[in-house]
Each structure stands twice: as C-alpha cells, then as structure tokens.
Amino acid sequence: MTAYKHKKQLGQHFLHDPSYLGRIVAAIRPEPDDLMVEIGPGQGALTRPLLERLKHLHVVEIDRDLIAWLGQAFPAERLTVHAADALKFDFASLGTSLRVVGNLPYNISSPLLFHLAEYAQGVVDMHFMLQKEVVDRMAAAPDTPDYGRLSVMLQARFRVMKLFNVPPGAFNPPPKVDSAVVRLVPKPAEAIPYRDARRFGEIVARAFGQRRKTLRNTLKGLVEPDVFESLGIDPQRRGETLSVEEFSRLANHPA
Ligand code: SAM
C-alpha cells in the first residue's frame, strides 16, 4: 500500500520501528487461543506480528480504504475486519475474556477509554499506545498536576500500568508529541470501590469541573455539608486532592 495518503483527521500515525513493535508484542504476550481485538489496525503494523502468535484476531477500523486493503492483505479465517467506529462498537458482541489492544487515534483517546471502561467486566486486559501526556494522566496519583477525572475513573475500575515511552520517530508520519504504552487490567467486581457507577461518575465529573473550587462548592446538591464531616473529609479540600477511595466513600454515603 505504497501510495496511501495518511488521513490526519483519523489520527493516522503508523508504527514502523521494529524494535518498538517487538516491545509492544512482548508486553502483550499473545497466546494462540486468545480472544483479541485490535482497535485501528491501519496498515497492519501491529496486526501482522500479533497474527504470527494468534490463531485469529478481530480488528475494528473506520477508514474505508484501509478496511478494503485489510480484507485483501489477510485471510478472512485469520482476521475478522469490523468496519466500524470504535467509539460506538459493541465490544461485548465479541465475547467475554476479551483482550483489547491498539495504537489508538490520539484525537479520540479519552472518549474511547471511557467507552471501553464500560466493558471492563468482560475484558482480561488492554494494551494501548497513546499520547504520553494521556498515559501520565491515566496513571497519576492524587495531588499531582496530571491527576484528574480520567485518572479517577480509570483507576477505580482498572490497575493502570505505564510500561514505556515511544518517541515520535517510531511512527510514519511522526506525531508532534511523545507516546507511551499502557496496560489496563480490570479489577474484580468485589474490588470496585463504588456501588453506584452513575453517582460516582457524577461526583468525580463535578469535583474536577472547576478544579480551583472546594468540594463544598463543586458538590453542592450532591453531597450534604454534614456528610463531609461524618466521612472525615474536609469540605475545604479541592477534588484534585481526593484519592479514588475517598471519592468512593462520598459516592457510597449513606453506607
Ligand atoms: N495500528 C496501526 C499502526 O500502529 O501503525 C495504526 C495506528 S493509527 C495511530 C490509528 C488507526 O485508527 C488508523 O488506522 C485510523 O484509521 C483508525 N481510526 C481512527 N479513528 C477510528 C475510530 N473512531 N474507530 C476505529 N478506528 C479508527
């Protein structure tokens, strides 16, 4: 596929450095019978080495030119191509014990991570290449500049492990930013700290909506003033100082 013109609006930066491709596949450790889906296979840079280890692979790709090319480049019994927008794709339709991988389009990474988090219970693990800055936010600890809604929402449901950085030169065309590979492993249901996902999400969104404001202000109407005291959480604190566990205590009240 030599004459292919990259579509910037689809975040197309194709990996070409064999040493980084090798490191990613080594981190994923595919086993022949794994049920795996790759998001955004592009020109198959990762697809190919994955298929050297797997009997079969699903891919979800939105670009019609690439979908047609993938269908010709790989035998249908080894690669199932889902012509779809990953943001709307029903990952549960592939089955349970699913492994998810991908060098993701950076322009939709946050909404895609929130979409994938909804399938956490049916997933074994996820390995993604993302903008380094996004991976730093995903893995950030409370009271650090990178800590925010993405950190809390993902860390509540997954163990988040940053694996290694990848420089722009590993891609064609090179992106303007550094990248990093991250592993997400869903927590077992009994380790999820909140009971009501919707209320937890609402509290976290409000607490980070106005980062400079105190919890007393941002959570007005959601958490009564006396509740803070009974939970031992100072309402003068700002959301960015709260741990995942403290957010869960607020969401779970009354216990
Ligand atoms: N995996 C390839 C590689 O590493 O060389 C390509 C990675 S490239 C960063 C992102 C890929 O995601 C492109 O193939 C692009 O067409 C595809 N893509 C972009 N938006 C998408 C979406 N909403 N759903 C599915 N695929 C998408």
Image (spheres, grey):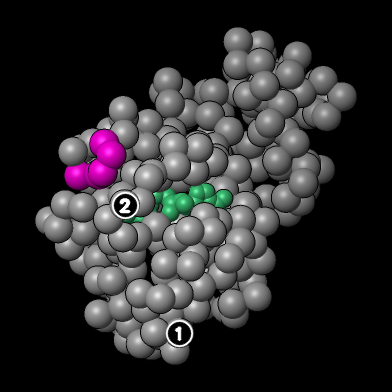
Residue found at x 45% / y 60%: 66
Instruction: Return the x and y of residue 16 as percentages of the image width and height.
Output: 21, 52
Q: Considering only order in the chain, which callout, 1 or 2, is on the residue closer to the N terminus?
A: 2
Residue 231: percent from left, percent from top = 69, 33
The answer to which quarter of the image holds residue 221 is: top right
- Seen in the picture, residue 97 relative to 86 is either above or below; the reply is below
The answer to which of 226 and 120 lies nearer the viewer is 120
In which quadrant is the N terminus drawn?
bottom left
The amino acid type, in three-letter code, at marker 2 is Ala
Count of marks placed on residues:
2
Ligand 1 within 8 Å of disc 1? The answer is no
In this view of the protein, which residue sits in the foreground, 224 or 63?
A: 63
* Left or right, 12 with reference to 62: left
Mark 1 lies on residue: 76
Please state the extent of the stretch shown in magenta in the rendering: 170-174
Residue that mark 2 sits on: 3
Relative to residue 10, is residue 75 drawn left or right?
Answer: left
Q: Position of residue 206 (x, y in %)?
A: 72, 26
Q: Amino acid at mark 1?
A: Ala
Q: Foreground: 42 or 99?
A: 42
